[in-house]
Amino acid sequence: MHETRRRQISRRSLLRATGATAGAVTLGTGIAQAAGRAQPQGAARAAGSAQGSGYAHPGLLHTGADLDRMAAKVKAGAAPYAAGFARLTANRHAQSGWTANPQVTVYRGAGSPQNYAILYNDVHAAYQNALRYHVAGDTAHADTAVAILNSWSSKLTSLEGSADRFLAAGLYGYQIANAAELVRDRDDFELDRFRTMLTTVFAPVSESFLKDHNNAVVTNYWTNWDLTAMACVLATGIFCDDEARVTRVVEYFENGAGLGSVRNAIPVVGDDGLAEWLEAGRDQGHALLGVGLMGTVCEMAWNQGIDLYGYDDSRFLKGAQYVAKWSLGGDVSYTANTRRKGAIGGWSGSETASDAAPVDPTMTRPIWAMISNHYTKRRGLSAPYLTRIAAKAAPEGGGGDYGPNSGGYDQLGFGTLAFTRDKVTGAGAGAGGGTGGGTGGGKPAGAGSASPSGSASPSGPAANAPGGSAPGPGSATTPAGGNSGDLASTGTGDLAAWTAATGITALAGGLLLLRRRGKTQQEQPRTGGGAHSK
C-alpha cells in the first residue's frame, strides 16, 4: 500500500508541477498586471524550477492562483477581501523595514534562556510582508521578507529547550517555510541556504517527535503536538521537493499511532454527521489549535493534489463542524476516553476525559475561513457551523492580533483575505489541488453534505482502553531536561496569559473540569501540553 501511495503522490505532483503550475504562471502574469502588482524578480527562474521539480511552487498554503485572486479582489475593492487586507496592513509585523534579530540557538521551554518569541515575531513579519507584497506589489515588502529570512538562514543552527522544543520546530518550521515559499523566486533570496536550514534545524526535530515522541508513550502527547510536527515535515517536503517527507506525513495522517492521526484526533463519528474532537475533552484553546493545524496540513497537501480534506468520508469536516458548534456554545456529545501517559521505562499513568470542556463563545483563532471555504466553496458541501463561525471571526487577522504571547502566533492567519473563494461549479468542483485525485474518500461537489458513517464507536489508542498502540522505539533514560516531568513541560501559563490578553474567561471552567475528574492542577502531571508554555 505504501508503494502505491508513493506512486500516487509522485504522479499527482508531477502533473501539478508540469501542467497546472505552468498554467498558473501564465494566468498569474495577466492578472497581476491587471492588478498593478509587480512581478517577482526571479519569475523565469521560478517557472523553470517548478516544472523541473516534484512539486508546484508556490504551493504551500497559497498557490499562484490564490495570490493572483487576492491581488485582483483587493484592487477591485471587493468584500470581504478589502477588509481582510486592511487587517494585514494595520498589523505592525506587516510594515516594510522590519529588522530581524536572528539567533544561533532558539530556546523554548523551562530550564533555558527562552528566546523563541524573537523567532516567531520575525517569522510573522516575513510572512506578512511577503503576503502584502503579492497583494499590493510594493517591492519594499518583498525586500523586507527576504532580508528577514536570509538573516535567519545565515545564523540559526539549533532548537533547544525542554519538550517544548518540538513545538518550536513544528510551529515555526511550517510557518517560516510558508513565508519563504512566497519569495523563493526572488534572486536575492538564499534558496539553497534556506533549504539547508529547514532540513537540518527544523524538520529533524519534528521527525524525531513523530518517530519517538520524546521517548514517551505514544499517547502521552495531545493531538496538537503531532500536528505541529506533521505541518513542519510536510511544509519542508514540499518546499524542498522531497517526496519521502511528503509521503511520510500523508501516511501518518491516515494511519499514525499518535493522537494527531485523523482517526485518533477524531475518534468517534456520530449519526448526526458530527465527529468528536479528542482534545475537546481537554480545553477549548487547544482544540481550536488542533483544528487549525489539521486544516493547515490538509490545505498544503491539497495544493499539491493530495486530498486529506476528503479522507475517510471527509472525517475532518465532521470534526471541524463539531468544534465549531461546540465553540459557538452548542451542545455536543463526548464519549469518555482514557489515554496512557508517561515515559518509556519510567513513570506512567493515565488520564480520562469524560466530557467536553466548558467554552467561551468569544474565544477565537484565525482558522475558520480556510476550512469553511474549502468545504463549502471548493466542494459544495453543507457546513452550517463552519459557515457561522467563519463569519463571526471575519475579518481574520494574524500574528500579533490575538494577544502578545505564543498562542497568538500559532497560526499565520489572514484567512478572510487569503482563503475567501467563489463557489466552484462544473467539472472542476471537488477536485483536489487542480489534479483531481484524492487520497481519501471525500465526496465531490454537489453531494450536499458529507454523510455520517453511522458509527458511534471510538477507535484509536486513546479510546477507552489505556492499552493504546505499542510505543515507538526509545530509550528508557530520563528525557532531556533532568526529570520525567519534562515530557509535560508545556503548561497552562502561556494559555492563561493569552486568554487574559484577549478577554477570555474559559480557563476557569477548564480548571473546574480537572477537579471534576478528581484531579487538581497541582496534583496532575503536566503531560502533553499544547503550543503554550511559560
Image (tube, rainbow, N blue to C red):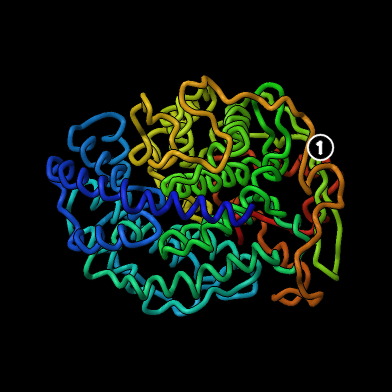
**x, y percent for residue 532:** 59, 56
Disc 1 residue type (three-letter): Ala
- Tell me which residue sits at (58%, 65%) in the image: 206
Figure label count:
1
Classify residue 276 by image quadrant. Answer: top right
Q: Secondary structure at mark 1?
A: loop
Left or right for 371, reference 508: left
Q: Mark 1 Cα within 10 Å, few/some/many (few <14, many 20+)?
A: some
- Tell me which residue sits at (41%, 46%) in the image: 303
73 and 85: which is toward the camera: 73
- Tell me which residue sits at (51%, 38%) in the image: 364
41 and 157: which is toward the camera: 41
Can residue 90 be spotted in the picture? no
189 and 518: which is toward the camera: 189
Instruction: Give the labeled residue for mark 1.
Output: 336
**x, y percent for residue 339:** 80, 50
**x, y percent for residue 380:** 45, 25
**x, y percent for residue 430:** 45, 31
- Tell me which residue sits at (54%, 56%) in the image: 6
Left or right for 153, reference 242: left
170 and 8: which is toward the camera: 8
